[in-house]
Amino acid sequence: MVWSEQDEAWADGIAVAKEFAAAHGHFLPRRPRCGRGIRSVWAKNARAAARRARENEELRAAGRPVRSAAGGDDRGAAE
């Protein structure tokens, strides 16, 4: 049963990554010169999400505020 489209897309991406890694011995897909390479786009997005999560954990550990992942823009907020 699929609980969300995001979960299903993540599971599909992981399956494709595992197939690629099994065939090539790594998961470093090349970016195509034209068009959109689904593997490379998924990998780029997954790496960016992991990087943001790591940076947010470092900010929290240092007691600094972390920006919302919901996309709100707080640059003009009153102080």
Image (cartoon, rainbow, N blue to C red):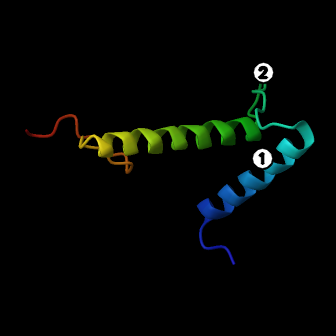
**What x and y, as percent, mark residue 50?**
53, 43
Are dots 1 and 2 in contact, CB under 8 Å? no
Question: Label 2 crowding class (10 Å Cα cut-off): few <14, some 14-19, many 20+?
Answer: few
Q: Quadrant of the N terminus?
A: bottom right
Outermost residue, left direction?
79
Q: Quadrant of the C terminus?
A: top left
Residue at (67, 63) in percent of width and height? 8
Residue 4 in the image: above or below residue 23: below
Give the side of residue 4 with respect to residue 67, left or right.
right
Give the amino acid type for the residue marked by disc 1 in the picture: Ala
Disc 1 or disc 2, which is closer to the eye? 1
**What x and y, as percent, mark residue 49?**
52, 43
Residue 18 in the image: above or below residue 54: below
Residue at (38, 43) in percent of width and height? 56
The residue pinned by badge 2 equals 33
Give the amino acid type for the residue marked by disc 2 in the picture: Arg
Q: Measure the C-alpha gap from mark 1 to mark 2.
A: 20 Å
Residue at (46, 45) in percent of width and height? 53
The quadrant where residue 78 appears: top left
Identify the mark nearer the N-term, 1 or 2: 1
Q: Does dot 1 land on a helix, a strand or a loop?
A: helix
Give the side of residue 36 with respect to residue 63, left or right.
right
**What x and y, as percent, mark residue 64?**
24, 40
Q: Does dot 2 land on a helix, a strand or a loop?
A: loop
Give the side of residue 78 with respect to residue 4, left or right.
left
Decide which of 35, 60 is in the foreground and name it: 60
The residue pinned by badge 1 equals 17
Instruction: Residue 52: give its label.
Output: none
Give the side of residue 3 with respect to residue 54, left or right.
right
Residue 20 in the image: above or below residue 15: above
Residue at (37, 46) in percent of width and height? 71
**What x and y, as percent, mark residue 42?**
67, 42
